[in-house]
């Protein structure tokens, strides 16, 4: 996962945990970021970039796509 390349200098060396709430079709429905990114402008840009990711959805025991949650660590 790549965050936007023009991140603020105070993000250098930091990491954030991004939790993706993924729909059954693989689209990101929402995300949560911990710790919160303090720079509001970059936080919006970061969220937009993360929401554009697509995932292979989770599967039920029967093989049907189902919504899921995954967490990824992003390093700056």
Image (cartoon, grey):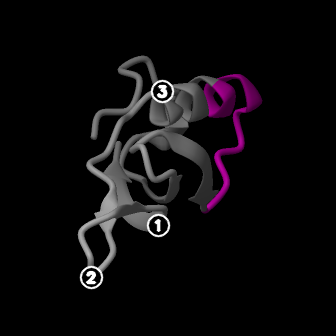
**Quadrant of res 5:** top left
- Bin the neighbour count of mark 3 within 10 Å (Cα to Cα): few under 14, some 14-19, many 20 and up: some
Quarter holding the N terminus?
Answer: top left
Give percent across and percent down for residue 4.
Answer: 41, 23
Nearest to the eye among marks 3 and 1: give it. 1
Residue at mark 1 to residue at mark 2: CA–CA distance: 17 Å
Q: Can you identify the residue that label 2 sits on?
A: 61
Q: Residue furthest top?
A: 6
Q: Earlier in the sequence, mark 3 or mark 2?
A: 3
Q: From this viewpoint, which residue is outermost toward the right?
A: 40
At mark 3, the secondary structure is helix
Residue at image location 59% in from the left, 55% down from the top = 33
Asked whether 30 or 56 is in front, the reply is 56
**Residue at the spot x=45%, y=66% of the render?**
68
Question: In terms of sequence position, does the residue under pointer 1 or pointer 2 come before the other?
Answer: 2
Picture coordinates of residue 3, whole percent (x, y) = 38, 32
Instruction: Please name the residue that numbered disc 1 is placed on.
Output: 69
| In the image, residue 43 lies in the stretch drawn in magenta | yes
Query: Rounded to the nearest whole Å, what is the CA distance between mark 3 and mark 1?
Result: 17 Å
How far, Cα to Cα, is label 3 from label 2? 31 Å
Label 1 secondary element: strand
In this figure, which residue is indicated by the disc labeled 3?
49
Does residue 66 appear to the left or right of 38 in the view shown?
Answer: left
Instruction: Tell me which numbered mark, 3 or 1, is placed earlier along the sequence.
Output: 3
Position of 45 compared to 70: left or right? right
User: Nearer the viewer's eye, disc 3 or disc 2?
Assistant: 2
Q: Which residues are magenta?
A: 35-44
Which quadrant of the figure contains the C terminus? top left
User: Which label sits on residue 47?
Assistant: none
Q: Residue at x 43, y 17 (%)?
A: 6
Reply yes or no: does residue 74 show up in magenta: no
């Amino acid at each position: 996962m790549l965050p936007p390349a023009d991140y603020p200098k105070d993000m250098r060396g930091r990491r954030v945990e991004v939790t993706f709430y993924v729909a059954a079709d693989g689209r990101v429905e929402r995300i949560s970021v911990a710790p919160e990114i303090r720079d509001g402008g970059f936080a919006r840009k970061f969220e937009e970039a993360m929401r554009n990711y697509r995932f292979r959805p989770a599967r039920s025991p029967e093989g049907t796509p189902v919504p899921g949650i995954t967490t990824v660590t992003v390093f700056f």
